Image (tube, grey):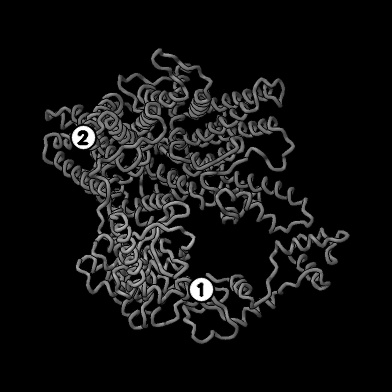
Amino acid sequence: MTKYLLAALAACMLCVGMAAAQDSPIQTLLQENRELIEKSSRRTIGPAIDALRDSGLPAAETVLEKWRDKDLWQRESDGLFFFAEKIDRDTLQLIDIATGDPLGEVPDDDMDQLKPNSGVRGMIAAALVQFQLQSPERRKRIAALNSIQRDPEPEHLDALRAAVEDEPDATIRTREERLLRLLTISYGASEETRIEAIRSFSGDTGVDVRAALNPLLATSRQAAEGDIPEGENVARKLRPGQEDFTKEDAYSLLVSKDLAPARISRADKRAALEANIADGQVGGVPVEHLNTEAARERAYASLAEAGTVPPTATEAEFEAALDAHVFYDRYAELSEAVTDAARGTLTSITTRVGLSQALDLSLDALSLASIYFLAAIGLAITFGVMGVINMAHGEFIMMGAYTGYVVQQLVPDYTISIIIALPLAFAVTFAAGVAMERLVIRWLYSRPLETLLATFGISIALQQLAKNIFGTQARPLTSPDWLDGALVLSDVVSISYIRIAIFVLALVFLAIFLFIMRRTRLGLELRAVTQNPRMAASMGINPDRINMLAFGLGSGIAGIAGVAIGLYAKVTSELGQDYIVQSFMTVVVGGVGNIWGTLLGATMIGFLQKGIEWLNPSNTLAAQTYMIIFIIIFIQFRPRGIIALKGRAAGD
Amino acid sequence: MTRSFLARNPSVLIFIACLALFTLAVTLMSEAGGSGAISTSFVKTLGKTLCLCLVALAMDLVWGYTGILSLGHMAFFGLGGYMIGMWLMYARTETIVTASMSNAAIPPTDQEIVDAIGTQIFGVVGGSEFPPVWAFADSLWMQLALVVLVPGLLALVFGWLAFRSRVTGVYLSILTQAMTLALALYLFQNDSGLRGNNGLSGLQNIPGLTGMPQSVLSLWFFWASAFALGAGYLLCAWVVSGKFGSVIRGIRDDEARVRFLGYSVEGYKLFVFTLTAVIAGIAGALYYPQAGIINPAEIAPIASIYLAVWVAIGGRGRLYGAVIGAAFVSLLSTWFTGGQVPSVPLGFYTVDWVDWWQVLLGLSFVLVTLFAPQGIGGLFDLVTGRRPPDRHGADLGPDKGSFREREAEQ
């Protein structure tokens, strides 16, 4: 008995459920638009989707989602809509669209799946955006904004406008407002609102603004007979034969618009002639005479007269066709006021971007300058103060970089390994420098040219040695995590932390150099020895020891520079070679024997190289070439460098 | 002063005689000339070595005699090679293109031939147009003139700028090195018009002589190189003998004093610099048809440094020293880097000379600079008994005055 009762109750419930399914407002709404939904065509479905979106019903969002995901089904017998999940091949689990309650399992014979095509799905998605924008979840709202930004549609405009009003979160609200203005640029209802939106972005360097404005100014090349037709938004008139619009371009434009007959290209003409060789002649011209263009023209003309080949436009027809037409670039956007406003705003943006780029370029140049300065500061001691040409200086930089690499192999923690590597690189190259000074250079102090050659010998040997030990492939010197990434100031201006670190390191070394040379005993004695070794010796200074220490110091700084350079460039055995000429240039341009000169020299070379690269961004090789030529010419005018020593300190 | 030039410079006769004997021996032993004891490729190597000797002569003239350590003469050498290479490549491509086009039904127009050559030559760098620098590539005589003119003009302009502003010593060396680097970097670009880092190739095939076997061709080039070396030696010996030679040696030893004596130091330097650049260009024009390929890496600063190394090891300040140094070191280098030298097993490590040759060269160079500033050529003084008086000091080397020693400096 109870069993029956329960069954009756269940049946009753089902009936109620069924009744609810039929009576719910959402179902009613769907039934009202039933024909449109069944037809499911992009052109006609609009009102149905709009009705759902604007209904304000809580179930509308779910229905749209399920519809988009092809989970909305229709019962053929009475036309009612349900959600359904496939249980197995022939059975469906029906779900009520209003309440989400399961309604039981039914065979799928009677059910029809709604399969909206991609066009309709896109429209549904646009409608859904409105729900997402007003979703209580912050994450969903941001995702919706992202998707609008990715591919904006005119439909989003209303949704956004509605969302802006009751957006509680300030940051999202700002973003929504910005996006709204961006969308207004492209899809705004009236010209005035669009122009207002365009003007509001004046001076805004965001990439999204430029992405929105540029399509407005996209042009297409047009040709018309007589005068330019009315109602065209002309960007500029073109005259055939001007720089970027040759007569051939103009004519092929006419041909592509079917305004003139095609001309036959030289290759085609040749092929046509070849196809019509008869008895060693083409159109009366012997084949062996066809080795000039004029003879070919003649032969082709006679063939065309005979009707064997299509006639081609003659030179006179070509000119006449060009004269009869006007050529112009046309904006796709029809309103002239809008394009003018867009151009104005874009100009102001370009100016701002240009300024930012100049700032960015200056930062780049500054960091390049600090790299050159780091590479050259060791030379400022050995070459600038002691006057020793050490061509193996670059190899000391390389040794420092390889020291850093070896340390990283032994100490896996990058931060600690860098901290160990810096003093270790100094120690290694200091020792190498002292050894070199003791063994080679001190015998050659009075023979600078031979010092140059002997140190070249050492440089060749050291390079090959590095190749033998570490191989020819580049070794990585990984920077610690806290040096990764970049300091981003705006869309255009950014500078990586590693470059800032190198800049700071360069300043530190400048300070150290000044301190040693001006405030320590070593600096005093070094200056004394370089000015007059015999006098210094009679004052109780040991010149041998001072020279040795000074040379070691210069080499040691090169080692530390090597670690810094290795952090941002790959470590190879040719690392030093890449810097040696520039380093010497830095010292020579700056003025030998003066650290401020070296600093100025590095700054000048850094800015110069970046400046030339900016003029010709595709070609860093050319930049280096022109820079070296510039330096050669610069030395003509200031042979002693930017800061020339005067008086007794100048020597000679 | 009535004695003839040759009587005053017996070394010239000895050198020419040795060179002639050597040429004769190689000719007789070559594949084309007789016994075939020397392979064609080795004849080419010897011919190339003679060209290197010629450029070493030029280097000795400018460094050993005038005291300008130029690190740019291999750039002039390479430029000479590029100039002749342009004609070789153009003319050879022209014969190939004409041959392939003559099979077509319709004879090609001149423009079509030029376009096809352009496509062939510049296809590798994605172009087909001839850049302006190739304007004379179709004329052998123009390109031969350019072999002399281009390095000469470059040296003239560069030298004028450098000497005029009194850049001397190591500064000049660094400046010439910068010039070489700039030139090499420029040529490395694809749009420099000389095929970027691909360089010019196929230069060993001489247009118009396609039927000639390489064995005969290599011998011809060997003779040409030997003749050029002989002529260059005569010219250099003539330049350094007599009054001009005294003046340039004076400039080397003390530039300021020569200037005070009223000589135009800049003029002398500029003449020597330009003359040697021309000689280097000619040497390059003979070298690269034998090498078969030229690319910007050949112009890199390191090549000029090696040139200085050869001259220093051979002994600068004497012409035969430069020749001996270039021949000795470059042949030794070929031998070592060719992998023909047996490796030395040390038990824990095997010294493979291909890897260690450069280390050996670098270190021996340091040793020569330190202990034998006269180089290999100094050995001849032992034979002739011409030794400097023993003043118990260290020799300062030729660029600081041949007869001055350390005491003079302190």
Expressed as whole percent of the image width and height from the top left, the position of residue A594 reads 22, 45
* Circle 2 chain: A
B402 relative position to A239: left or right:
left
Expressed as whole percent of the image width and height from the top left, the position of residue A182 reads 33, 72
Query: Going 17% across and 37% down the picture, which residue do you hit?
Result: A527
A592 relative position to B125: left or right:
left
Residue type at mark 2: give it. Ile
Q: Say which of A642 and B112 sits in front.
A: B112
Query: Going 62% across and 40% down the picture, which residue do you hit?
Result: B203
Q: Say which of A150 and A285 sits in front.
A: A150
Residue type at mark 1: give it. Ser
Expressed as whole percent of the image width and height from the top left, the position of residue B195 reads 55, 48
Dot 2: element: helix
Residue under numbered circle 1? A220
Residue under numbered circle 2? A416
Q: Seen from this angle, which residue lies furthest top?
A: B347
Query: Going 58% across and 71% down the picture, which residue do you hit?
Result: A246
Expressed as whole percent of the image width and height from the top left, the position of residue A191 reads 37, 83
Q: Say which of A479 and A447 sits in front.
A: A479
Instruction: Write down the quadrant of residue B283 in the picture.
Output: top right
Q: Measured along the vertical axis of the image, is residue A324 above or below residue B310?
A: below
Q: Seen from this angle, which residue lies furthest right?
A: A279
